[in-house]
Image (spheres, helix red, strand yellow):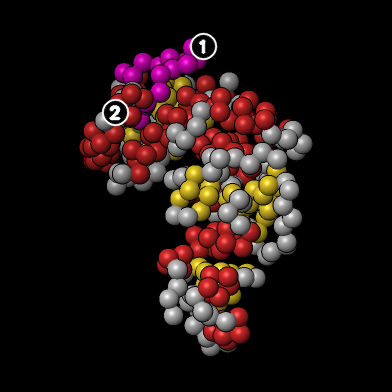
Amino acid sequence: MALSNSSESGIITSRELRKAGVTARYATKLCGPGGPWRRLMPGVILLRDSAPTRHQLLQAAVARFGPDVVVTGADALRALGVDCPATREVHLLVPDYRRMPAEPGMLPRRTTRMPAPTLIDGVPFAPPARAVLDLARLELDPARIAELISLPLYWGLCTLDELSEELEAGNRRGSAAVRTALRRVDPEETYAHGLAKKVLDGCPLPMPSWNMTICDRRGRPIGAADAWWDDIGLAWQFRAPKAGTANFHPLALTATGTVLVRCTIDQLRRVPMEVAEELVRAYGEAARTPRPKVRTIGRIDDAA
């Protein structure tokens, strides 16, 4: 039996099977109890008797509903390299002229604004701005919406202007919370934090606390840390102070015995490995010395 190249992923349609000479009756037998295949959806078969991977499930959705659908939401962001959890359902954009049959595990949304997709391993994915806004519209928690909205900026996939333009072009219904979250996004802050996290992803260091104000024993603020390792007293600064906020002198921190690493956003972008090496060196130094007698609170300029 010769099957087409589309079956290399393990997903094949009943139509393709018929073209390969496999009758519907025989395919049903192979998908039955004890058979080597599994039917995932009407007309879509997995050529093995095992649970499909997430990507095979996306391929099955496209095979079931046609090449004019586009996968959006968390699956699209993950395909573009964003580290975010998958949703329970596959979120699909469907042309408004299409009728979609109900299918367990699928969340189709008809739209007059079908985006130009990016094809990755045979699956059409929505661009990042559209994908994250489609995902955010499903959320009810304002904090979660704010977190989602920052993702494509954090990973450098689009700009704040692109997000705003996409939001304005879409349906305004149900978008109030998303609009509020978008107005509060600080793109420079998000971008810097994303670069810093990528540096730490390549380091053998535990994750720090972010955006902390360091205080002396009396509780007086003496410095700020963009990242802070509390158990050893290691501070990392990579943001320039904002206008109108506290501008602490580095010596006030180091005088307490705090080990301080300083770099610029440009260094995070251009020489991340050098920054990572300096952090590892500083972490070792801080671990060998007594923890400074300081305490922390949430960053003052973030609360302003």
For marks 1 and 2, the one nearer the N-term is 1
Q: Nearer the viewer, residue 116 or 85?
A: 116
Q: Residues within 10 Å of mark 2 (few under 14, many from 20)?
A: few
- Using residue 227 as the reference point, say whether residue 270 is left or right of it: left
Question: Which residue in the rendered view is the most extreme toward the right?
Answer: 173
Residue depth check, mark 1 versus mark 2: number of the one nearer the observer: 2
Task: Indicate whether 72 appears above or below 266.
Answer: below
Residue at the spot 45% in from the left edge and 73% down from the top edge = 3
Residue at 31% in and 18% down: 251
**Which label was assigned to residue 212?**
none
Q: Quadrant of the C terminus?
A: top right
Q: Hey, which quadrant is residue 294 in on the image? A: top left
Query: Which quadrant would residue 224 be assigned to in this image?
Result: top left
Nearest to the observer: residue 233 or residue 195: 195
Residue 289 percent coordinates (x, y): 25, 37
Bounds of the magenta span? 236-251
Residue that mark 1 sits on? 244
Q: Residue at x 53, y 60 (%)?
A: 59
25, above or below 284, in the image: below
Q: Amino acid at mark 1?
A: Gly
Q: Amino acid at mark 2?
A: Arg
Residue 70 visible here? yes
Residue under pointer 2:
270
Q: Label 2's element?
A: helix
The N terminus appears in which quarter of the rendering?
Answer: bottom left
Q: Say if mark 1 contacts mark 2, CB within 8 Å.
A: no
Real-space CA distance between mark 1 and mark 2, rounded to the nearest whole angstrom: 29 Å
